Amino acid sequence: MYDSIIIGGGPAGMSAAIYLARKKMKIVLISPEFGGQAAKSAEVENYLGFTKLSGAELTSKFHEHMSAIGVEEKIGEVKSIAKIESGFEIKTSEGNLQAKSVVIASGKTPRKLNIPGEEEFLGKGISYCATCDGPLFKDKTVMVVGGGNSALDAALEMERYATKVYIINLNDDFQGDEIRKDRVKASEKIEVIAKAETVSVSGTQFLEKIKYKDLNTNEEKEISSNGMFVEIGWMPATEIVKDLAELNNLKEIKVDRENKTSCEGIYAAGDVTDILEKQIIIAAGEGAKAALNAWKYIVTHK
């Protein structure tokens, strides 16, 4: 029986693990990988104490810190969480575990287009984060796929680096804020392709061409592009807890200021929750808060 099981190996999960380990709690962190979304950031320039480094470098430092204080780690996938008399039973791909409390820091995963070539060119021209990877496309042509604020923000972000930015939008107009729409329409670098559906991507070693269907004529067309940013939303990894903790309309876990969920004994932190800002430094702080409050729960329920 563990005092707490932390689910997720991103900044929130690793931060929670460090704080609980320092409280001498018996814990284990379970994740299919370490680093989370943060590890995929090309450059991080807004984490306190580091002027500039890659996301992989930063999360590697988190992992080194966590390992140095002896946190038990398990590489695996959590299948389900069930409430039991003594706490919780967590079924994983590596077996079943029990704990008095749970800290969920499973993050979010980007929605995918699920088109031919998408997996093949991931990291070779295709990205799900313009803020993370924008500088890699300096003086190149890029495509943004999406029709909401995320797509508008990505296009405006890429305007700083690319020579040409296309936006493929399924609809006639954007489902975003007017100020963003106005900025996009005023840009000399950004060209909007409305009523269009992305069909496939192709290239040799790296992305070279994007094929889309004109929904007005059903004609398929092709554009040469060095990069494509898919900005059609993110999905919180909340499937394992949807029957235990209350979610909001975006399927994020609702938490209070102590990171408590609606299920006693379950805490949550980071991008999987309904906190407003999704940033590495905020996720790390939320992980620390969740851990401290989980510790209070553990010591008062022995």
Image (tube, rainbow, N blue to C red):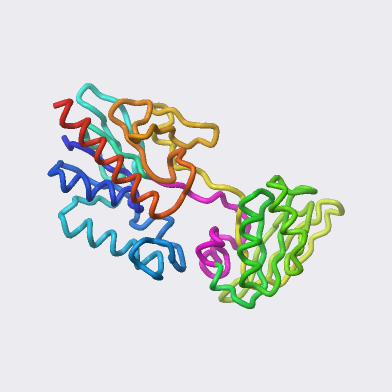
The picture quadrant where one finds residue 141 is: bottom right
Q: Report the residue at 80% width, 48% height from top.
A: 172
Quadrant position of the C terminus in the picture? top left
The picture quadrant where one finds residue 140 is: bottom right
How many marks the image carries: the answer is 0
Q: Position of residue 297 (x, y in %)?
A: 22, 30
Q: Report the residue at 56% width, 62% height from top.
A: 130
Q: Is residue 279 above or below residue 300?
A: below
Helix, strand or loop: magenta stretch: loop
The residue stretch that appears in magenta: 106-133
Q: Is residue 210 above or below residue 95?
A: below
Instruction: Identify the residue at the far top of this view.
Output: 85
Q: Report the residue at 60% width, 57% height from top.
A: 230
Instruction: Identify the residue at the far bottom of this view.
Output: 139
Left/right placement of residue 83 relative to residue 301 reads right
Between 76 and 244, the residue placed more toward the observer is 244
Quadrant position of the N terminus in the picture? top left
Q: Position of residue 186 (x, y in %)?
A: 77, 61
Q: Is residue 114 magenta?
A: yes
Q: Is residue 111 magenta?
A: yes
Q: Is residue 200 above or below residue 203?
A: above
Q: Report the residue at 28% width, 43% height from top.
A: 6
